[in-house]
Image (cartoon, rainbow, N blue to C red):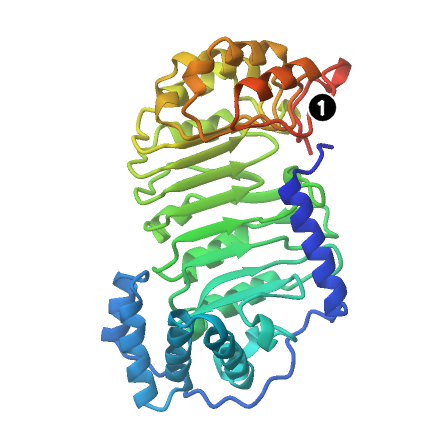
Amino acid sequence: MAKLSYGKVLERVIQVLDDFFSGFDPITPAPAPVSDVPPGLREPELEAAILREPENDDGYLVYGDWLQAHGDPRGELVALQHAELLATGAEKKALEKQVGDFLERHAEGLLGELYFRDSFHPSRYSGRSSGRVYWHWHLGFIQRAWFGSNHAYTLDVPRVLTNLLTHPSARFLRALTVGLLDNDADSNHYEGIIQLIVRHAPATLRELKVADVLENEFGLSRVRLGDVSSLYAALPKLHTLILRGDMVLGAMHLPELRELTIETSGLSRESLRSILSARWPKLEKLVLWFGSPEHGGDVSFEDVRPLLDGAGMPRLVHLGLCNAGFTDAVCEALPSAPVLRRLTRLDLSLGTMTRVGATALLGNEGSFAHLEMLVLTENLLDASSVEALEMRFPAVWLEDQRDAGGSARTVAYRD
């Protein structure tokens, strides 16, 4: 099992502390105050303006005025949150508490079955509740949502997802993260989750993360996403897509995508071909985990070589070729690769880089001098290679190198 990176350790610590201080409440919706939000209040023309430009706050403000004029408390919430955005110092803190109190007071109408105990504590109304659900509000509506089971409790994720995507408060949802389904199951199957997203996700959704799990707690080889290709037509305006587990990508068409991350314990040639055959006019960040043969990872360096040409990805500036069994070969090919000149960040972590790869980088130091970040963590570098790279590459990350001897010459993450 690979060591956890600092970020993953921090995430785990936060989760454990959050569970501790929450008192390990049962994962059931809490009794909420009586609703005073008028059901089904709609104004299609004003909603259409937000749907066209969900990043433009003006549409929300006009809609908020209309809601307030028609007796919907959500209109007051829009005004309060807008005032909070503009305020500073003590005024901002006072408004933050006022917004939290408002959300708590109107919880039933604003969330209905999505209301969970402690989710609207005034001091953290936009924060995670007990480490299992998180709603971030922006100008009267849920802007970002995260939820999932954890090491202690199992959440009814399909039910929560359905309630969220069909609730008026999530009408303009822009970011959705679905975590672990069941920590106690032998495997987690997300095929039904994918179809719920396809059927109900709003047109405003710009960021989607599926199977946001800690790999040390639940192996990616046990996470089954199935065929995810139906997402593309349903969410053509996605900017960020992060998928973790075993999946079939199919024919990809996401012309607005800026970030694509595929984390798997075994990336297939078929999946790589899906990525290579697509056009990515706006893609800025691409991160791939290749994995090991025992989990279907049959990609070779020759299969990856077209990525180093950068064809079809004119805006790519961040490339991650991670958890690969051919990291040394990548290092030897990179100095002359057309894509390198465009990159600001290069991630070769979790792989099999040895002194051979280090020598290739050190011998072509100038080719990498423009990089703002070079991530080589959790590879197989010896102490002398680490020292040399640290001296010559000021932007390099080299933590958590593994023993390169014997059977350990494999990718960092294999579960």
Left or right position of 256 against 403: left
Q: Position of residue 33 (x, y in %)?
A: 58, 88
* Amino acid type at image mark 1: Arg
Query: Around disc 1, counting alpha carbons within 10 Å, would you say few (fewer than 14), some (14 to 19), or many (20 or more)?
Result: many
Left or right position of 302 against 339: right
Q: Residue drawn at (49%, 11%), measured in percent from left and top?
A: 332
Q: Is residue 71 above or below residue 383?
A: below
Q: Residue drawn at (64%, 18%), measured in percent from left and top?
A: 387
Left or right position of 144 against 71: right
Q: Is residue 376 above or below residue 252?
A: above
**Secondary element type, mark 1:** loop
Quadrant where the image shows the N terminus: top right
Q: Residue drawn at (69%, 69%), measured in percent from left and top?
A: 27
Quarter assignment of residue 353: top right
Kindly identify which residue carries mark 1: 402
Seen from the viewer's position, the closer of residues 273 and 320 is 320
Quadrant where the image shows the C terminus: top right
Q: Position of residue 91 (x, y in %)?
A: 46, 77
